[in-house]
Image: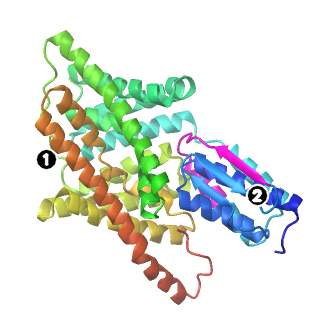
């Protein structure tokens, strides 16, 4: 389009700012926010060099007197809105909307209803229950974690989210998860308390900030990536604080802290087939929490479960170790995420976030905390350092796929006669 007047430039930049605002507050990575804003501005004839996006803010300037700065806190993952805004930006590029029509579409996305509270509570229960098996738990451990995950997310929906700050809500959430597991275990519901606790706190783990922080670093957005990883680390710390408080109180009441013996692998749930099923349905549960569009639940589950099975196969049957096995599994997940994005015509973000979630070192969070409060400092350091190495392995796996397979996907796209759409990132 031709260059804009000052008035129309303001309308275009406001539109691009609105799109970026929705994307950023709902869990999009920085590169996607910038790409979508630039796509909108470029189509309507405005310079694309006017946007500076950070993890919680957008700076927009125009060629005339336009300047706008917005602070945008992360409200929680609603990846369905990210998918919708990404599609709107591409439809704008195809000439399907006027500026006013595009604004109306974006405003409708901004007020889009998320899944019902009952669906999210059930998703948390399913995710926690099946992830108990991933962490080595028995069927009874899985059932106990299902109950704990259900009650925990009911607390998040009705108490924590509407009435508490993120910090205090995560502290109480971590405390509640551990408290529920201790009660259930004392009633004979569940066999290994450590497995139950780890699975029950997993719904609180900040998978979206963690994954996007890694992706931002991989895309060389170091400031935003570091900020998001620090935010995720703060959430980890709050969960750990809540969990450790219950362990300490229980220790004071009973004269000694609960004795746990690390992750115990149940032979009945350890087979690769059972692990694949657990990762598949567990990921579907967390896809609900993350606000993934329902039509992509199965694709997300396939990507995550294949990555998890590869990790287990490499770790159990080779001498690669945990970090290297995580690296290769992440490479598979990232590659499948790009393939799924191209096949489903949707951002790869949703597949990467859910795909690496089984490998996110959430279990290391609890065990580092437990070993610290029980004065087993050597074990605490070992588990914490392993969690760092796993995180680095995930970063390197995503960086590797961002660099090499990108060319392969583009080459495949050129050979495909029927594909005319641009490749989703």
Give the side of residue 63 with respect to residue 411, left or right.
right
Q: Nearer the viewer, residue 51 or 370?
A: 51
Q: Is residue 157 left or right of residue 260?
A: right
How many numbered discs, if any? 2
Segment colored magenta: 66-86
Can you identify the residue that label 1 sits on?
A: 267
- Describe the element under mark 1 as helix, strand or loop: loop
Residue 80 among magenta residues: yes
Rendered image coloring scheme: rainbow
Secondary structure of the residue carrying numbered label 2: helix
Above or below, comparing residue 278 to residue 412 in the picture: above
User: Residue 295 at what x, y percent from top left?
Assistant: 55, 57
Residue at 78%, 58% (x, y): give it: 102
Mark nearest the camera among 1 and 2 is 2
Task: Tell me: 82 left or right of 224.
Answer: right
Classify the position of the N terminus by image quarter: bottom right
Q: Which residue is mark 2?
A: 13
């Amino acid at each position: 389009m031709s260059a804009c007047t000052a008035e129309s430039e303001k309308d275009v930049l406001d539109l691009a700012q609105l799109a970026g605002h929705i994307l950023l507050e709902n869990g999009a990575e920085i590169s996607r926010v910038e790409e979508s804003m630039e796509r909108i501005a470029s189509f309507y004839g405005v310079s694309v060099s006017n946007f500076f996006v950070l993890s919680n803010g957008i700076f927009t300037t125009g060629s005339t007197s336009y300047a706008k700065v917005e602070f945008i806190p992360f409200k929680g993952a609603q990846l369905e809105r990210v998918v919708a805004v990404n599609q709107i930006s591409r439809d704008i590029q195809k000439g399907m909307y006027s500026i006013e029509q595009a604004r109306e579409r974006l405003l409708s996305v901004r007020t889009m209803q998320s899944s019902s509270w009952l669906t999210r509570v059930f998703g948390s229960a399913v995710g926690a229950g099946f992830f108990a098996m991933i962490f080595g738990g028995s069927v009874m451990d899985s059932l106990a974690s299902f109950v704990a995950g259900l009650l925990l997310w009911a607390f998040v929906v009705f108490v924590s989210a509407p009435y508490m700050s993120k910090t205090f809500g995560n502290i109480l959430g971590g405390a509640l998860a551990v408290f529920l597991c201790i009660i259930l275990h004392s009633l004979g519901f569940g066999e290994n308390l450590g497995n139950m606790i780890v699975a029950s706190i997993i719904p609180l783990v900040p998978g979206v900030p963690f994954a996007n922080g890694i992706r931002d670093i991989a895309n060389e957005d170091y400031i935003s990536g570091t900020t998001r990883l620090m935010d995720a680390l703060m959430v980890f710390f709050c969960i750990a604080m809540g969990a450790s408080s219950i362990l300490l109180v229980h220790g004071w009441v009973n004269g000694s802290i609960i004795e746990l013996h690390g992750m115990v692998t149940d032979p009945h749930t350890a087979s690769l087939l059972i692990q694949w099923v657990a990762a598949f349905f567990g990921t579907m549960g967390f896809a609900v929490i993350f606000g993934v569009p329902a039509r992509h639940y199965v694709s997300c589950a396939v990507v995550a479960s294949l990555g998890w099975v590869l990790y287990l196969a490499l770790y159990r049957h080779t001498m690669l170790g945990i970090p290297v096995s995580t690296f290769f599994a992440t490479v598979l997940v990232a590659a499948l995420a790009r393939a799924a994005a191209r096949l489903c015509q949707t951002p790869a973000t949703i597949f990467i976030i859910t795909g690496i979630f089984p490998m996110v070192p959430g279990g290391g969070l609890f065990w580092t905390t437990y070993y610290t409060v029980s004065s087993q400092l050597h074990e605490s350091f070992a588990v914490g350092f392993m969690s760092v190495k796993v995180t680095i392995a995930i970063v390197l796996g995503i960086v590797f796929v961002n660099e090499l397979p990108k060319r392969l996907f583009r080459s495949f796209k050129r050979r495909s006669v029927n594909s005319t759409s641009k490749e989703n990132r």
